[in-house]
């Protein structure tokens, strides 16, 4: 039954879904281990046939990963896959590399290194030598210090002949291998000067963070590389924390966005709200989104925003015209206003002034319209009439309401009718003739908008 199911599955392409791929790898590995998939009169007659048989799209990776998973418990598979690579038989040598990579990820790094060190590299053709070095470039950092050094020494004689292929391999092995570090420096020194600067950050990982130069003096590639290093060391190094926070202000968009991602999961309660609010002044929208996301996470974990802090956020975003950012910000503000029954003037102005900007850019879709309706409703419902007049410009507020109502497609707004009714009811308390004037002046537009 299982073999028949496998036959049917192999006839269908796998969708591009990581979770489904992982499940399928586990399923296929189970069939292989229990003897259902490989053997006499089975779907595949051998390990290598299972590895290289061409099936529907997506199965090449699944077949290779499943064999790699089995190799964790059977080092003979590792030797077989490496020998297959040495023989130069496979039409897709990348599949052999996937097997080895999966075995390493699943805990068989020592076994892979042992078999790799037994390979006669001098017998490899250029194409398959490149496959081995590409594999080392991706997985070499996962080997133990002893294995990194042994592999580096084995590769060293080939450096004069294959400098470009071995440079990244030595780089991957250089974390704990003196030989690899030496060869990496030597091969980089042979490059033109303008190319050498691309590797500056990679050499800095061999120095304590306290000896790293200011980030603004480094190129983008170096900053991105070091950012990964700092994130890995943030739990044990205050210097790493400081470097990440500094990187959020990088002049390079990719660096600043990467540095500002997942700040709360990284720092937890140590994350300063004042620092995060500062990110909202970044010129990069991605950084501002990350900053607001961190604020939401802080609130969800029990951080109580003060009116002054919400006002600072409003001031930072008072000219915002990015739809995603406006939605995040207005959602935060609406929830705060409803909870505290207060409306700081700058907050009201920041919410309201965003409406004509989004309307002008035709960005008042169902999602943004719903959030802005909720925000205006929260403002109108949260204050007594005398408080509202003291806090919010009523004339301006009514203009925001009109602009929003004539710009949205109410059918596309979830619970839109109820939201509009609540908003207009709250406005009636403030201006009893507003609804009448609204209907008289904007009725044709409402009809056009299918109200």
Image (tube, grey):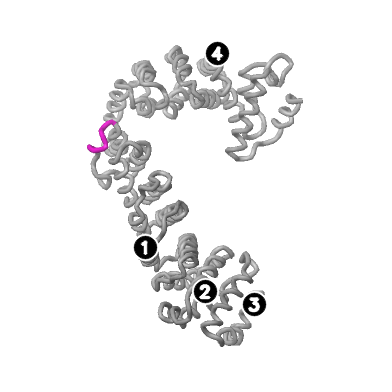
Rate crowding at label 1 as few (under 14), some (14 to 19) or many (20 or more) other CA atoms within 10 Å: some
**Which mark is first along the chain, 1 or 3?**
1
The residue tagged 2 is: 381
Left/right placement of residue 138 relative to residue 210 reads right
Tell me if residue 208 is in the magenta stretch: yes
Query: Residue at left 38%, top 63%?
Result: 306
Q: Position of residue 89 (x, y in %)?
A: 56, 18
Q: Position of residue 72 (x, y in %)?
A: 54, 20
Rate crowding at label 2 as few (under 14), some (14 to 19) or many (20 or more) other CA atoms within 10 Å: many
Q: How many marks?
A: 4
The residue tagged 1 is: 309
- From the image, state whether disc 3 or disc 1 is nearer to you: 1
| Stretch of the chain drawn in magenta | 206-211
**Which mark is first along the chain, 2 or 1?**
1
**Which mark is first along the chain, 3 or 2?**
2
- What quarter of the picture does the N terminus occupy? top right
- From the image, state whether disc 2 or disc 3 is nearer to you: 2
Query: Residue at left 60%, top 25%?
Result: 66
**Which mark is first along the chain, 2 or 4?**
4
Mark sitting on residue 76: 4
**Which mark is first along the chain, 4 or 1?**
4
The residue tagged 3 is: 448
């Amino acid at each position: 039954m299982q073999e028949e199911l496998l036959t049917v599955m192999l006839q269908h392409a796998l969708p591009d879904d990581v979770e489904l791929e992982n499940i399928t790898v586990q399923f296929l590995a189970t069939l292989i281990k229990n003897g259902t998939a490989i053997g006499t009169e089975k779907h595949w007659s051998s390990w290598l046939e299972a590895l290289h048989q061409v099936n529907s799209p997506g199965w090449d990776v699944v077949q290779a990963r499943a064999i790699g998973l089995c190799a964790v418990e059977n080092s003979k598979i590792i030797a077989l896959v490496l020998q297959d690579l040495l023989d130069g038989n496979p039409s897709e040598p990348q599949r052999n590399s996937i097997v080895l990579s999966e075995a390493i990820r699943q805990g068989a790094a020592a076994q892979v290194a042992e078999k790799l060190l037994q390979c006669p590299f001098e017998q490899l053709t250029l194409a398959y030598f490149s496959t081995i070095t590409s594999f080392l470039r991706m997985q070499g950092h996962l080997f133990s210090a002893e294995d990194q050094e042994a592999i580096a020494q084995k590769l060293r004689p080939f450096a004069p002949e294959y400098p470009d292929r071995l440079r990244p391999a030595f780089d991957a092995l250089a974390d704990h291998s003196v030989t690899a570090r030496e060869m990496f420096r030597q091969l980089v020194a042979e490059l033109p000067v303008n190319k050498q600067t691309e590797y500056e950050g990679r050499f800095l990982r061999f120095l304590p963070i306290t000896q790293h130069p200011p980030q603004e003096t480094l190129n983008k590639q170096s900053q991105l590389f070091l950012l990964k290093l700092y994130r890995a060391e943030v739990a044990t190094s205050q210097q790493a924390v400081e470097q990440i926070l500094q990187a959020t202000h990088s002049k390079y968009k990719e660096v600043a966005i990467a540095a500002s991602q997942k700040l709360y999961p990284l720092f937890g309660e140590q994350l300063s709200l004042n620092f995060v609010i500062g990110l909202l002044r970044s010129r990069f929208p991605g950084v501002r989104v990350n900053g607001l996301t961190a604020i939401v996470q802080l609130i969800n974990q029990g951080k109580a925003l003060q009116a002054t802090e919400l006002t600072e956020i409003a001031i930072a975003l008072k000219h915002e015209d990015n739809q995603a950012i406006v939605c995040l910000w207005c959602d935060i503000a609406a929830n705060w206003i409803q909870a505290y029954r207060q409306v700081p003037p700058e907050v009201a102005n920041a919410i309201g002034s965003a409406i004509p900007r989004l309307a002008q850019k035709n960005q008042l879709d169902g999602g943004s319209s719903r959030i802005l309706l909720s925000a205006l409703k929260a403002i109108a419902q949260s204050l007594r009439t005398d408080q509202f007049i003291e806090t919010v410009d009523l004339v301006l507020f009514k203009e925001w309401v009109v602009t929003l109502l004539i710009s949205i497609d109410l059918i596309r707004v979830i619970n839109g009718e109820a939201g509009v009714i609540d908003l207009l009811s709250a406005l009636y308390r403030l201006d009893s003739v507003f609804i009448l004037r609204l209907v008289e002046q904007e009725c044709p537009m409402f009809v056009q908008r299918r109200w």
